[in-house]
Amino acid sequence: MILSIKLAWKNVWRSKKRTWITASSIAFSVFFACLMQSSQLGSYENMIDNSARFFTGHLGIHQVDFWEDQIIDNSFDQQALLELDLTKPSILMGVPRLSSFALASHGDRTKGAALFGVSLEEEAAFSYLERKLIKGDYNTESGVLMAAGLAANLNLNVGDTLVLMGQGYHGVNAAGKYSVTGILKFPIPALNQGAIYLPLETLQEFLSAPNMISSYSILLEDSQDTEGMKAHMETILKGKELGVKTWQEMLPDLVSSIELDYYGGWVILVILYIVIGFGIFGTFLMMIKERTYELGILNAIGMTKRRVQTMVAIEIFLLIFLGVLMGVLMATPIILYFWANPILLSGDAALAMEKFGYEPIIPFALNFKIFYNQGISIFVIALFLAIYPMLAIKQLKIIKALKE
Amino acid sequence: MKVIELKNLSKIYNPETIPVRAINDVTLSVKEGEFTAIVGPSGCGKTTLLNMIGGLDISSEGSVEVGGVSIQDMNESQLTAFRLQHIGFVFQAYNLIPVFTAKENIEFIMVLQNMDAKTMQERSDDLLDRMGIKNQKNRRPSELSGGQQQRVAVARALAARPKFVLADEPTANLDSGSTEDLLDIMAKLNKEEKITFIFSTHDQRVIDRAKRVITLEDGVIISDEHR
Ligand SMILES: Nc1ncnc2c1ncn2[C@@H]1O[C@H](COP(=O)(O)OP(=O)(O)OP(=O)(O)O)[C@@H](O)[C@H]1O
Ligand SMILES: [Mg+2]
């Protein structure tokens, strides 16, 4: 075995140019694939993070009927959660949220609005809501923060008074006057045209639903760790009228668009790998063709075919390993750089991203899985292509080989 | 003692299409310590005969015994192991592993035989010395002359302590000086250490040095002369 490794190592460096060309082509494909997957996974992480922070949390606790019918009557008493120990190292934080609908009027104008009762202080850390403020003050005791589009439609400004009318808990009438203390600008049109944020207690009071919340959103350390955490939560919540949903369950469209994009990326990579695969195969072909005589000599003087195969297999492994290593080494600093400094988009691309509620950046993921994926893929291809040289050695006829 | 015993040996190439009877009913035995040349015109069957003796090819008819062991019915890997342990090979050219030095080429065989490192060292140094290529031991084949390469090949063939050395036209690619040198070494090994050599050639100077000359024509032995 040591002899085979030594011989293989020397053989790899025998035609330096070919080794470098083959290794470089592998390195290039690994490099390209790593960058591509890193930016893909990075933007997924970013989209998931954005959506989870803003809308659903990685996990959401709701009253069992809430997800079917998102009405105020399907809210729950937040006291129920206070008794529970929801701290866990893998849980970053959780926030209570209450949502409802109402008519918002100012002067002679009236519009439908979505009301969000939140803990403003916690929300600043959870969904970075404070960053959306473009005018006025974020912190308010009993005022409201209005989306810019809605404020404009109602001709409202900071300091003006807004009238809200709607239906409260169990059908009671809800009405109230609130002063606008801040204006929020959202990239998502639906939010920008209709969202009103209030301190949680203010909304609870308006809806005559003291202590009630519609959801308790939880942010996890690892966005993919939802199933295990969900099960954990469910055991804690046993016996209560509460259920747990994962972001994957709450945001099925996001899940499917990520999947579509991910597999789309793989299609590109598969095409790339097929091209690279032909290059690798060419090298394998030459490896055998050029050396038939020599392999014949080795077999003739007493090296078993098994050992000859081992030697060539090690050569193949070294070659592929060199290529993958080069590719990973090339990709790592670039991924590290873009991971720390995401590419900022501008122009139409940025607008399009913002419209869907995402930051206009291409973040890169720093994930070992990326390198692993590409490394394994190349090795699987090489393993498959190595069937040829292995068979060629098996079928080698010494007397024929010696005539080459 | 007989090291090789061939009985009614025949080799037919392409038996199904255009059969070529390259070796035709050859019966022959070679004793230990012989220095035998197989001669004859091109295409007479020298290579074919040596290949069958060396277990590189199998006969169509008849039997081959090496050191009293019939190699007739061995499978491929048994044959490979047999060659490794009992037969030394020298081919016409490009015998050596190009990426290994002279010394590594000689030791290669011994590593395959799982010889211990110390014995291997001693043996390869000794062989390099005897072949007169001690100073070239760290050179690769491409840095050696044709004659030096063939001497390394002989050293490698001997490294395994074979029953005999088979050499198919070992001097064909050498100039007359190198041919003489190689023959001197082979003759010396034969004389002093009783190493059995069987080689093919059509070089008259080489034939003149042989102690037994077997002449083939169209796959048949037409003369067998001991001198
Ligand atoms: N693989 C083969 N298929 C068919 N015929 C073959 C094959 N190998 C050799 N022959 C034929 O067998 C005969 C003997 O060939 P061989 O190579 O043994 O001769 P040789 O004496 O070694 O010749 P040379 O001196 O040219 O090396 C020749 O007629 C040759 O054409
Ligand atoms: Mg020949």
Image: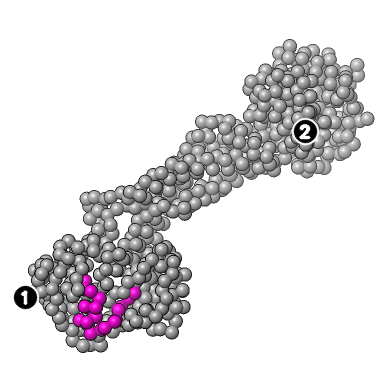
Q: Where is residue A119 in the image (x, y as percent from the top left)?
A: 27, 72
Pick the quarter of the image with the C terminus of chain A: top right
Q: Position of residue B226 (x, y in %)?
A: 91, 19
Q: Mark 1 points at which residue?
A: A108
Label 2 CB sits under 8 Å from any ligand 2 atom: no
Residue B113, image quadrant: top right
Q: Name the residue under label 2.
A: B118
Q: Residue furthest right?
A: B1
Magenta stretch: give its range. Answer: A194-216
Q: In the figure, A243 relative to A266: above or below?
A: below
A68 with respect to A326 (left or right): left
Residue A193 appears in the rendering: no
Q: Residue visible at 35% across and 70% down?
A: A94
Amino acid on which disc 1 is placed:
Asp
Front-most of residues A395 and A288 = A288
Q: Residue visible at 47% across and 39% down?
A: A25
Residue A125 is one of the magenta-drawn residues: no
Residue A211 is one of the magenta-drawn residues: yes
Front-most of residues B107 and A396 = B107
Badge 2 crowding class, 10 Å Cα cut-off, few under 14, some 14 to 19, many 20 or more, is: few
A250 with respect to B165 (left or right): left
Q: Position of residue A273 (x, y in %)?
A: 46, 46
Badge 1 crowding class, 10 Å Cα cut-off, few under 14, some 14 to 19, many 20 or more, is: few
Q: Where is residue A337 in the image (x, y as percent from the top left)?
A: 37, 46
Residue A227, image quadrant: bottom left
